[in-house]
Image (cartoon, helix red, strand yellow):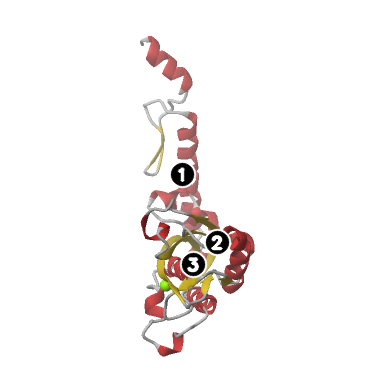
Amino acid sequence: MDKRSDAQARRCPSSTALKFGDVQVAGRARMYPVELALRVHAAWVMMARYLAEQRGLAREQQPAWLDDGMMARRKGSMGGLRIGHGYDVHRLVEGRPCIIGGVDIPHERGLLGHSDADVLAHALADALLGAARAGDIGALFPDTDPAFAGADSLVLLGRAMAHIRQLGFELLDADCTIACQEPKITPHRDAMRKNLAAALGVELDQIGVKATTTEGLGWEGEGAGIGAWAVCILEKR
Ligand code: MG
């Protein structure tokens, strides 16, 4: 054994050959302790699932960690978690209110749209609907429907969340970014978070809002419009 492989062997002391089911806990090749621990954990989950099945326990009677453990992830499952992403843009024009995250921001121009054009609420609603594989805000609240003319987008956001809860999902966390040169967003950020959390029926800490300029670049930088992005994580209950 040369110097290099000898040093590697000291760092990777385990070489025990052990198999449990189709999970090789340790093979002939040496492995790092962390990898060994992960394999032992996988074997433990498999053994616990096997014993539960032998005892005739239904899936819902089995411990939750059996579904959320390593074996579930090994099979490509997110263990009931879903990720969603939303993006929206509205044009800035004169003679309209500038409502973002439910806050009516004093500004010489506002956002153009069929509803109140709350770009942040729309992006977040699309993230939620995307995570639940429930379409998008345009399908749920068509901009051709007169019923939604001038609608409060926080109300629409709350209705989207109710729809998602009916599908069996709950919101764990969401984060949003607004891109615009003007108006200044930071002074209104906490009020936006509060409005969004209240509309969704979640804790304030579960909603993040931040803003960025684009250093004068692009249509956001030129003030032609405002864009918003949102990501969220839902859990199937
Ligand atoms: Mg929109």
Residue for point 50% across, 61% down: 182
The quarter in which the N terminus is drawn is top left
- Disc 1 residue type? Ala
Disc 1 from disc 2: Cα separation:
26 Å
The nearer-to-camera label among 1 and 3 is 3
Q: Which mark is residue 162?
A: none
Comparing 121 with 41, the one in front is 121
- Disc 3 residue type? Leu
Disc 3 secondary structure class: helix
> How many neighbours does mark 2 have within 10 angstroms: few (below 14), some (14-19), or many (20 or more)?
some
Q: Position of residue 151 (x, y in %)?
A: 49, 82
**Which residue in the structure is indicated by mark 1?**
42
N-term-proximal mark, 2 vs 3: 3
| Residue 152 visible in this rendered orientation of the protein | yes
Disc 1 from disc 3: Cα separation:
42 Å
Q: Is residue 118 above or below residue 85?
A: below
Comparing 167 with 231, the one in front is 231
**Which residue in the structure is indicated by mark 3?**
120
Ligand 1 image position (quadrant): bottom left
Ligand 1 under 8 Å from disc 2 Cβ: no
Q: Position of residue 154 (x, y in %)?
A: 54, 75
Q: Which mark is residue 172?
A: 2
N-term-proximal mark, 1 vs 3: 1
